[in-house]
Amino acid sequence: MALSTNGSEESELYHAQIHLYKHVYNFVSSMALKSAMELGIADAIHNHGKPMTLTELASSLKLHPSKVNILYRFLRLLTHNGFFVKTTVKSNEGEKEEDIAYSLTPSSKLLISGKSTCLSSLIKGALHPSSIDMWSSSEKWLKEDKEQTLFECAKGENYWDFLNRDSDTLNMFQDAMAADSRMFKLALKENKHVFEGLESLVDVAGGTGGVTKLIHEAFPNIKCTVFDQPQVVGNLTGNENLNFVGGDMFKSIPPADAVLLKWVLHDWNDELSLQILKNSKEAISHKGKDGKVIIIDISIDETSDDHGLTELQLEYDLVMLTMFLGKERTKTEWDKLIHDAGFSSYKIIPISGFKSLIEVYP
Ligand SMILES: C[S@@+](CC[C@H](N)C(=O)[O-])C[C@H]1O[C@@H](n2cnc3c(N)ncnc32)[C@H](O)[C@@H]1O
Ligand SMILES: O=C1c2ccc(O)cc2O[C@@H](O)[C@@H]1c1ccc(O)cc1
């Protein structure tokens, strides 16, 4: 390579190297976050009630004294990544000496256990070895002529069967979904009009009812049904207006004024999503033009200038592809799917940063 006089070629090369290395080592940031969650760093700082020094934190976490400096190195990366902030505190009352102390940021507050906004179970499930290990089979998967997920290629069974094999794995998944659903509270407050006037609603593939419980709280008069696989809802009990029903959404869906599909259609390819939407249309058919389907999922806007947000949406797309042969859809893909299912119109309302609420009308 010729040497340039202004160094721009070298500069481009070094930038390219940094860009590439950054993507190679992104997993370290994910794993450091997982370690912070497992150690309970956010809980320790939260319970302390004020910024916490490294020594206080190490002692509260019951780390071996030889690991204090290692904790510092984790905190340094996590602080750089926006999970903690460093402040200074007086070492001793009345003395001049100062110590570094750590406090929480809005992102690490999402790791405080017991709070309705705690997302620790999502980190636990999404970064579980079962979701990560499969990636070592990606070359084999891409070169073989078999219509199966990367997960199945790596593990020999599909993800739904894997989930249903033991209750710990199923609970881990359902806990993660319920945690994500609790975050819907704010979006519900801002979009009350979507649910006003409904007499009944069925939350299809609604898991353990995370979203429905919020809707039931805000609209106690709506007759809510959480519809999911019998092994998910079989042991759950509700009340007069909150009901759990087991069944198969590919066969039929209980009738209601509105069908809710949160984080469901992205698990399935277009053919199976079309089947779910057609069954949803049938479930609201008794309401004529007054029924509706409410979809909560990602709608990718490839023209968005929010690079980080689009990156997250495209990452989710690959997770859905590799685990379920599902997909995150662009606005154009939603338009086609909704019209192919026989609906006449729809409205996309962006909610919670990276997801959208799509109101679909017959
Ligand atoms: C990604 S989770 C979404 C759960 C919930 N909607 C939420 O957002 O928290 C997908 C759900 O689909 C359910 N599911 C899968 N196949 C189903 C079927 N054939 N009929 C009904 N539910 C099904 C799973 O049990 C799981 O709870
Ligand atoms: O975040 C996860 C997710 C979200 C929505 C969905 O429909 C499926 C999902 O599966 C994974 O992509 C990921 C997850 C995997 C396992 C687990 O226990 C929790 C989350």
Image: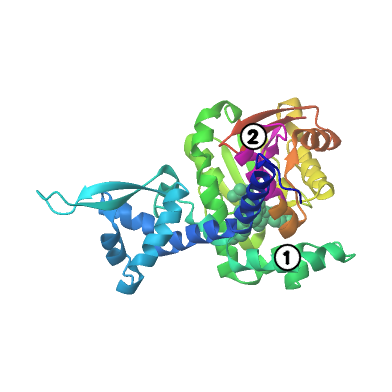
Q: Is residue 154 above or below residue 187?
A: below
CA gap, disc 1 and disc 2: 29 Å
N-terminal of the pair, mark 1 or mark 2, is: 1
Label 2 crowd (10 A; few <14 / some 14-19 / many >=20) = many
Total residue callouts = 2
Q: Is residue 296 magenta?
A: yes
The residue segment tinted magenta is 292-317
Q: Amino acid at mark 1?
A: Phe
Q: Secondary structure at mark 2?
A: strand
Q: Are marks 1 and 2 in contact (CB under 8 Å)?
A: no
Q: On the rendered structure, is 79 left or right of 135?
A: left
User: In the image, what residue occupies the spot 40% across and 57% down?
Assistant: 75
Residue 39 location, x and y as percent? 40, 64
Q: Nearer the viewer, residue 188 or 239?
A: 188
User: In the image, what residue occupies the spot 78% across and 39% down?
Assistant: 282
Label 1 crowd (10 A; few <14 / some 14-19 / many >=20) = many
Q: In the rendered image, which residue does mark 2 sit on?
A: 357
Instruction: Tell me the number on the disc at residue 264.
Output: none
Res. 256 visible in picture: no
Q: Quadrant of the C terminus?
A: top right
Q: On the rendered structure, is 90 left or right of 69?
A: left
Q: Is residue 301 above or below residue 248?
A: above
User: In the image, what residue occupies the spot 55% across and 46% down?
Assistant: 181
Q: Is residue 232 above or below residue 7?
A: below
Q: In the rendered image, which residue does mark 1 sit on?
A: 151
Residue 222 location, x and y as percent? 56, 36
Residue 154 location, x and y as percent? 74, 70
Q: Amino acid at mark 2?
A: Leu
